[in-house]
Amino acid sequence: MTINKKLHFIVIDDSKLDCFIAEKIIKNTGKSESIRSFLQAQEAIDYIASAPPADDDSHTIILVDIQMPIMNGFEFVEAFENLPRKATANYTIYVISSSINENDIYKLRNYPSVRQFLNKPLTSNNLAILLG
Amino acid sequence: MEKPEKIKVLYIDDEQNNLNGFKATFRFDYTIYTAQNTEKAYEMLKAHNDIRVILCDQRMPDKTGAQFFEEIHGEYPDPVRMLITGYTDVESVIDAINKGHIFRYIKKPWTDIDIKSAIEEGNKFYTSNSLLVIKNKELQSAYDELGKFAYSITHDMRGPLLSIVGALDLAKGMESLTEIREILYMMDDAVKKLDEFIKNTHEYYNLKRGKLTFENIDFNNVVKDVEALFRITGRMDKVRFTANVVQNEIFLSDEISIKIILSNLFSNAFKYQRRNADDKFVDVNIEVNNNKAVIFVKDNGIGIHESHINNIFRMFYRATSEESGSGFGLYNVNDALTKLNGTIEVTSVVNEGTVFKVTIPGKTNDDK
């Protein structure tokens, strides 16, 4: 990750507490330009689809949970990958979950847009590693 | 009392006399079908799929009994097959037995007792085999459910726990008391969610393993009990609750199941209210008539979208991300109703409210 780029964050989790924790931890890094949380994945898709194209020196990191009602993490990633390429450039997806199910983790390899799987809870330590 | 159904037996022999004699001897004990050749036998098997025992003569003009059994093995694996032979064709009999095509071999001339004991033994074998098939199916479905259960439990129990771990980690670095308090409230929610899941799991196992105990249900008391539960937790605050019970007769049912049904329906009605509405209400109407209880639980909450309505009784299905839910509640309701032979209907309009109608027949003395 290039350090000069402006970093934006999107957090998608149906647990308010987990969104809150993620927001605080991200804020504490001092590296974020903006943070948006969504309790429903569909709202995040709508937001990304309608967001103005990002300029080259900014980048958005998405942290998405797997098990959520209505649209789960896998369905989110599928919907994301079906968006026009223009809309999804400059995004990196990290899946963060309490799942210890190997199948879930294995399944994520099929999605090219997913950079990495992270175990919950998100801590300032593993966020720091992720941001390099 | 009705007699148990007669065992259905098919007898195949090319000599009409043998067929007649067989039928005359055993028609009182068994339902007998006869066939003079294997072609006829096929027709019989096709027409009567509940034939349990097949007896076949070994020496017939078109083919041997052993050949016939080998043929039908694939298409009709269930009936128990027995070979009757007057000759000592030991080779072919051994061969047939070893290939697993026949259950028993009966020597000609047979005695009534030979045939009877063979049919009874064969029937026992048939029954235990089909019982095994049913048990296997039950086992498979229990196993599937367990898999689903184990998968969801890692999320529903670990989820809130890990939230708390994360929150604790965060709180350690906080200086401001206001911030710490904010995070404490959120941790409180996570703990409650976990507790609700455990309570629901307990209900689930009560329903699965528990036996029903039938006693007179006084719906006024049951509603009061369930209402008290919600009163304590403060979940009824700001929601107008009315209950109207009409019951002038004894109603026999299982109280635990009834309470599980009511408390889950009440819980949903209180939980899924529109946050900013100022006239929130939950209306309960129960009428017991002609040994049938009809329960209406009505609210003016957020409603259920029609695309979700068919799935709401599925285990772990959640139609909304608003409010904490385990996806267990209505599954348990449905499970309890299945045990009581009850039914549930739901009508809902988004942002206007939901009505659940539950119908439960009371236990009568004719019931098992």
Image: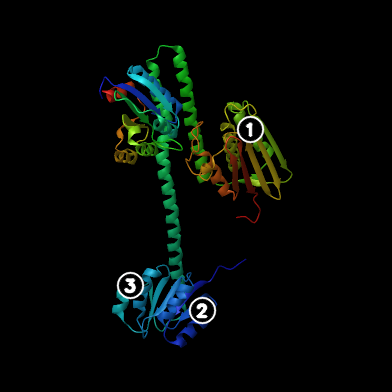
Residue at the spot x=47%, y=23% of the render?
A: B186
Give amino acid for label 2: Phe
Q: How many marks?
A: 3
Protein chain holding label 2:
B
Protein chain holding label 3:
B
Q: Which residue is mark 3?
A: B97
Along the viewing direction, whichever of A15 and B191 lies nearer the viewer: A15
Q: Which residue is mark 2?
A: B26
Protein chain holding label 1:
B
In the image, which is nearer the foreground, mark 1 or mark 2?
1
For this view, does B365 lie left or right of residue B39? right
Which mark sits nearer the N-terminus, 3 or 2? 2
- Work out whether B236 lies above or below B332: above
Q: Which residue is mark 1?
A: B227
Q: Secondary structure at mark 1?
A: helix
- Work out whether A13 lies above or below B30: above
Q: Position of residue B176 (x, y in %)?
A: 43, 11
Which mark sits nearer the N-terminus, 1 or 3? 3
Q: Position of residue B205 (x, y in %)?
A: 50, 42
Cα–Cα span, label 3 and label 2: 26 Å
Q: Position of residue B296 (x, y in %)?
A: 65, 41
Give amino acid for label 3: Ile
The reply to whether the C-beta atoms of the residues labelled 1 and 2 are less than 8 Å apart is: no
Quadrant in which the N terminus of chain A is drawn: top left
Cα–Cα span, label 1 and label 2: 65 Å
Question: How many residues crowd mark 1 within 10 Å: few (<14), some (14–19), many (20+)?
Answer: some
